[in-house]
Image (spheres, helix red, strand yellow):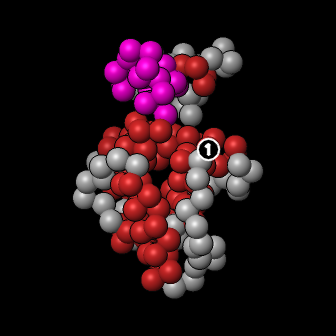
Amino acid sequence: MDSLEARSRDVQARTFCKWLNTKLETANYTAMNSLHELSDGVKLIQLMEIMGDVSLGRYNKNPRMRVQKAENVTKALEFITSRGVKLTNIGSEDIVDGNIKLILGMIWTLILRFTIADINEEGLSAKEGLLLWCQRKTAPYKEVDVQDFTYSWTDGLAL
C-alpha cells in the first residue's frame, strides 16, 4: 500500500473511530482508541444497542476465545442485517481478524444507515448529508473549515 493510501486509510479510521465514540459516549460506555477494539464484538454490540435503541440480549461481555468473539460479532452483524442494512463481503471472521478495510466499509454503511438517513430527510444525498454532519460537528471550532472530503482533512484539524 502506498503512503498516500495508508495515510488516507489512517485518517478514515481515526474519523470513524471518533464517530463511533460519539455514539458510545451517549450511553456512558468507554471510548475506543482503535477500530481493532471491535474485534471481540463487545463494542459492536454496544453500538448496535445504542443505534437501534434495543437490547440484543445476552452476549459474552469478556470474550477470551476466538469462538466467543465470533459469536458476539455474529450477533451484531445479524442485528445489522435485520435492520435492512446490506453488508457485502464481510463476515464475523473479518472483524475478529481486524480486517481494517472491510471494517471501514461496514462502518461507512452504518453511518449511511443510522446517521445520514436522518439528514437525507432534508433532501440531500448521502455524501452531502455526511458533509453537512461534519460541518455541524466542527462548527464550534473557528479554525476548522470542512468544505469537502479531501483537502479539508489534510491539516488534521477536522479530526
| Magenta run includes residue 158 | no
Name the quadrant containing residue 51: top right
Q: Which residue is mark 1?
A: 23
Q: Position of residue 69 (x, y in %)?
A: 49, 75
- Asked whether, in this view, residue 142 is left or right of residue 82, the answer is right
Q: Position of residue 46 (x, y in %)?
A: 60, 58
Residue in front for this viewpoint, 151 or 52: 52
- Residue placed at 25% from the left, 58% from the top? 89
Q: Can residue 131 be seen by looking at this rendering?
A: no
For the residue labelled by badge 1, is the local secondary structure a helix, a strand or a loop?
A: helix
Callout 1, which amino acid? Answer: Lys
- Looking at the image, residue 127 lies above or below residue 113: above
Q: Can residue 15 be seen by looking at this rendering?
A: yes
Q: Position of residue 64 (x, y in %)?
A: 57, 83
Quadrant the C terminus occupies: top right
The magenta stretch is: 115-134
Q: What secondary structure is the stretch in magenta mostly built from?
A: helix
- Looking at the image, residue 65 lies above or below residue 93: below
- Asked whether, in this view, residue 62 is left or right of residue 134, the answer is right
Q: How dense is the environment of label 1, judged by Cα within 10 Å: few (below 14), some, or many (20 and up)?
A: some
- Residue placed at 58% from the left, 67% from the top? 57
- Asked whether, in this view, residue 16 is left or right of residue 46, the answer is left
